[in-house]
Amino acid sequence: MRNACRMAAFHPIFCEKLMLVLMITAVLLICVIYMNHRSASIASHEARSVSRMLPITPVDFSQYQKRLDDVIAAVPSFKANVDCGGVVGSNDTAVQAAEQWTFDENLFMEGFYKYTDRCEAISKTFLFLDSPLSLEEYEYPLAYGLLVHSDAVQVMLLLGSVYQPQNQYCIAVSSSADEQFQTQMFELMECFPNIFVTLTQPVKWCEYSVLQGVLECVHYLTKLKADWKYYQYLSGVDLPLKTNLEMVRIFKKLNGSFNAGIHDLEGERYRQGKEAPLPLWKSSLSATFSRESAEFLISNSKIRELRDYLKGTMCPDETFWATVAGNPDHIPMPGGFNASLWKEKLTGEWDKLYATNNTVLLTAKAGYDLFQPEKYYISRYQIWHGDACAGTFTGFSCAYGVKDLAALVKRPELVAHKLYFSVQPATYFCLYETVRRRAFLGNTDFNVDAYAELPGPKLLAGTPFEELLFNAPQGFKFY
């Protein structure tokens, strides 16, 4: 182009300016095409994801049990070498064999590539359900937001384990992910009308890009006409500890409350030279909240101010949830709480100031079971550095090992974080099989009333703070 311009006897400076104009025009044209395509994709998915009548017929659980058997049988050498029941029962021989087993992902995917239809391959290989397992689940749809960047097989196993067609799913994919991974994620949107996939800015650990990607999905989910009730965040290295029906009943007991952990925020996480717009608190990136809370946090101006402040701070994803939910004087979050009061209770200061009050703080090691929470925060189970971990610590938290499995299968939290195929992968597949098989037993005779006794739902039910029971085995601890 430059040579053609000069051959036409135009002045060199004119040619350079012409080239610049053409380049800018080309870039703008590409952006317009991308935004139009993105808008069309969003509009198309919103139209497809509207809650619709699904066939609610008697469920043949034996069919799903057979499909699960097929999935597990396709995991190379797993059934021949790993006895999950023996591991959970702490049988030494079973534990040692499970610790030594490794997962051959390439061999596992050979079965996947035998299918000519990619959607059928995904559905069968990763066991995506084609109908709700009960009327109760159909009438109480959930929403999930995922932020992912790698390991497509693990992401699809996770997604299959929480998938039902009445729920809504948004997957934010880091634009720094390799092209093959991006393609695999976008295939999910082509196959399932209730899964939306979007590219987000390159995600870097402990930077604002993490929070940005998560909130993009929350924003998208709030715009859907589909009538989902509760939102839950998932990392690509999570696995559910509860079946969909169990989660539905637990969310009903949460009664609209916003479930997040609270802790003091370290000084170095504040933005230097600029005052925070409200008191800041630390929490896990994983939180659980209602549709009403989600719509409020997307539209509130004070929360937008907080987001601007958090840009450039360290790990803003761990500053956001407890801050927006725990400052009622600044942000009237539906289902929220007073983090300052909760801290007083969790540190024991409240008991010292009000020795005759009726509240009780359980700081001794409390018992727990599958539906018996031992602490107020139940969104995610995560072990931090300093506590026992049978696997290995990465990024200051535990990647679970085989000897953690006996506890994992009884934990009362909703999801476990984190599990890696590179760290004793038998842990992953035993937990995956245990929870999925429980869903396909068709058992509805279980009691989750204990979740209604957590501080959040009790406050919303009208219980005075002075009468709340706080479960906190380790006191004011970061969960």
Image: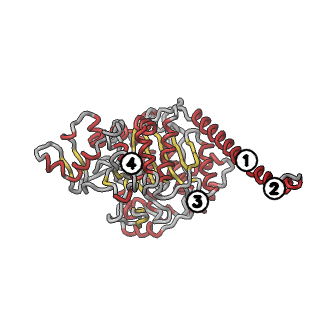
The local crowd at label 1, few if under 14, some if 14 to 19, many if 20 or more residues have their Cα within 10 Å, is few
- Could you tell which of marks 1 and 3 lies nearer the N-terminus? 1
Residue at 22 percent of width and 49 percent of height: 344
Mark 3 to mark 2: distance in Å? 60 Å
Q: Amino acid at mark 3?
A: Phe
Q: Is residue 99 above or below residue 19?
A: below
Label 4 or label 2, whichever lies nearer to me, is 2
Residue 250 visible in the displayed image: yes
Labelled disc at residue 108: 3
Under circle 4, the secondary element is loop
Taking the image as shown, residue 470 lies to the left or right of residue 290, namely left
Residue 390: x and y in percent read: 38, 66
Q: Quadrant of the N terminus?
A: bottom right
Residue indicated by mark 2: 12
Question: What is the distance, in whole Å, between disc 4 and disc 1 at their CAs?
Answer: 48 Å
Which callout, 3 or 2, points at the residue further toward the start of the chain?
2
**Residue at the (42%, 53%) spot, across then down:** 316
Which label's residue is closer to the chain start, 3 or 4?
A: 3
Label 4, label 2: how many angstroms apart (C-alpha)?
Answer: 66 Å
Q: Position of residue 141 (x, y in %)?
A: 46, 36
**What amino acid is found at the position of numbered circle 1 in the picture?**
Ala
**What is the spatial separation of the Cα atoms under label 2 and label 1, in whole angstroms?**
21 Å
The residue wearing badge 1 is 26
Q: Which residue is mark 4?
A: 414
Say which quarter of the image contains residue 325. Answer: top left
Mark 3 or 2, closer to the camera = 2
How far is mark 1 from mark 3, CA to CA? 44 Å
Mark 1 or mark 3, whichever is nearer to me: 1
Say which residue appears at 32% left-offset and 50% top-offset: 262
